Image (cartoon, rainbow, N blue to C red):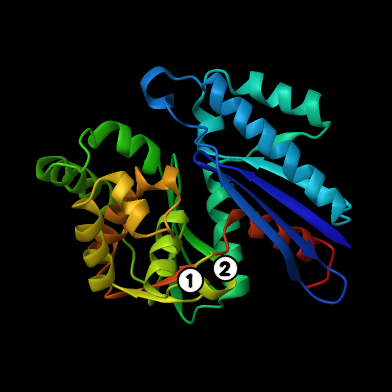
Amino acid sequence: MKVASIDVGSYSCRLSIADFSNSFRIIYEEGNITALATGLKENGYLQEETMEETLRTIKKYIQVAKQYGAERIVLIGTEALRRAKNSQEFLKRVKEETGLELKVITPEEEGSLAFLAVAFSLKPEGKFCIIDQGGGSTEFVCGKGTEVEYLKSLPVGIVNLTEEFIQSDPPKPYELESLKNFLDELIKDVVRPCDVLVGLGGTITTISAIKNNVFPYQGSLVHGSKLTLEDIMFWLETLSSMKAEDRVKTFPHIEPKRAKVIIPGLMIFYRAMLLFGKREIVVSDWGIKEGVLIREYLSLGLG
């Protein structure tokens, strides 16, 4: 049996297909930046251009999933679709043009799925806390084994933080300082004791890919890798001193659309590692789209 999941995120739209035949196995993955949440903080609405691009991407993914023989395709949406005043319009268009329902999940479900993906694939020892940094929200989920003990979703991600704090290219020192102070106030309240810190999202997987010279990107070579606090500090300092276009020219690992928003993502991990008192963070390429597939797999009694 093959099942596909499509994660319609605030910044990227991603596909995973798993084969449940003998054991749980990811057989295909693809991701594209569609920046669905662009302009959302400013006016509360999804933009026509980004809705069109996201819908085209969803249609392409459905076609790919069917080519791989997926018997079930699950579509989930996150923060941008939770907040947008016109999200129902977009959900209706998806249903009309694909025949499939795009389900908008709660922040709690989002965090739980990401936690499940990490627990199932990396099996961290002791208590661990995941930081799932996305385009419109960042989830902090702590627990042990597959049991969630604490979950908090903060309504900040790389899109809305960039729009609010980063007006210059490269960013000015005072913009970075303002961003740092803002994040410290939010993150200090979600800090919980843990043995292992795990980072998720395109920012941290991109940095791991640069450090480990993974190009073109291969998730399997990034999944389970580790970054030190010094790594995060180095790349924050290096990339924030460059213009967005130069980041791409110098490091082709960085997608052109990600280059503009990667600084707030790095700042989230930098401040979180300091406040959690951790010198190292494990990188997970698996997130909510894999979590959806794992949940389906376990629900069939296969795990």
**Marks 1 and 2: CB-CB under 8 Å?**
yes
Q: Is residue 302 left or right of residue 267?
A: right
x, y percent for residue 173: 11, 45
Q: Is residue 104 left or right of residue 94?
A: left
Question: In the drawing, what numbered circle is on residue 194?
Answer: none
> Quarter-wise, where is residue 53 in the image?
top right
x, y percent for residue 35: 49, 36
User: Dot 2, crowdedness within 10 Å: few (<14), some or many (≥20)?
Assistant: few
User: Which kind of residue does numbered mark 2 sit on?
Assistant: Gln
Looking at the picture, does residue 90 appear above or below residue 72? Answer: above
Question: In the drawing, what numbered circle is on residue 218?
Answer: 2
Q: Residue at x 57, y 68 (%)?
A: 218
Alpha carbon distance from label 1 to label 2: 7 Å
Looking at the picture, does residue 162 appear above or below residue 146? Answer: above
Question: In the drawing, what numbered circle is on residue 214?
Answer: 1
Q: Residue at x 25, y 45 (%)?
A: 243
Q: Residue at x 61, y 73 (%)?
A: 121
Element marked by disc 1: loop
> Quarter-wise, where is residue 290 in the image?
bottom right
Whether residue 160 is visible, yes or no, is yes
Q: In front here: 155 or 99?
A: 99
x, y percent for residue 287: 57, 58
Element marked by disc 2: loop
Looking at the picture, does residue 165 appear above or below residue 93? Answer: below
Q: In front here: 97 or 273?
A: 97
Quadrant the C terminus occupies:
bottom right
User: Which kind of residue does numbered mark 1 sit on?
Assistant: Val
Quadrant the N terminus occupies:
bottom right
Residue furthest left as drawn:
174
